Amino acid sequence: MASRICEWRRDFYPGVGEFDVDVSMASCTLGSLPLKAKFGRLPALLQTTLMMGGVDGILGHDLFSAYDVRVDHGHTVAIRPL
């Protein structure tokens, strides 16, 4: 995934508080669906905390703006174009 830093943002996560993050624009695929989105690198403490819980990343606004996303409690995710 090639990317370039396009901005910096202040973000917030419960238990961690506020932090600054560099934001990059990149293209990727989710399954077979293309997505151009902004990605931020989380602070090391938050990355480690999420990884210990089995979380690889946090999906954001760009995904929900481009696709109809449905998640059920059985951990099934359905993504389709709007």
Image (cartoon, rainbow, N blue to C red):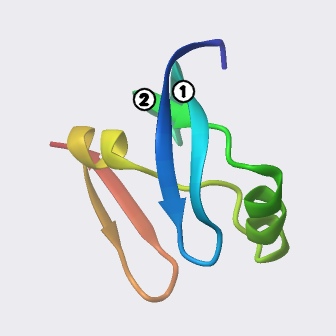
Q: Residue furthest left?
A: 82
| Image vertical order of residue 78 relative to residue 62, above or below | below
Amino acid type at mark 1: Cys
When asked about the image quadrant of residue 17, the answer is: bottom right
Q: Residues within 10 Å of mark 1 (few under 14, many from 20)?
A: few
6 or 70: which is nearer to us? 6
Circle 2 crowding by C-alpha within 10 Å: few under 14, some 14–19, many from 20: some
Residue 36, given in percent of the width and then of the height, sits at 41, 24
Eye-nearest disc, 2 or 1 = 2
Quarter of the image for the C terminus: give it. top left
Numbered disc 1: secondary structure: strand
Q: Secondary structure at mark 2?
A: strand
Label 1, on which residue? 28
**Residue at figure coordinates x 73%, y 68% from the top left:** 50
Q: Does 12 appear above or below 42?
A: below
Q: Is residue 51 left or right of residue 18?
A: right
- Label 2 sits on what residue type? Ala
**Label 2 or label 1, whichever comes before in sequence order:** 1
Residue at position x 71%, y 57% from top? 56
The residue pinned by badge 2 equals 37
Horizontally, is 32 left or right of 5 in the view?
A: left
Vertical position of residue 5 compared to residue 62: above or below: above
Report the Cα–Cα distance between label 2 and label 1: 8 Å
Tell me which residue sits at (84%, 73%) in the image. Answer: 52
Q: Quadrant of the N terminus?
A: top right
User: Do callouts 2 and 1 mark residues in contact (Cβ within 8 Å)?
Assistant: yes
30 vs 14: above or below: above
The x and y percentages for residue 33 are 42, 34
Query: Which residue is nearer to you in this view: 67 or 9?
Result: 9
Residue 73, percent from left and from top:
44, 88
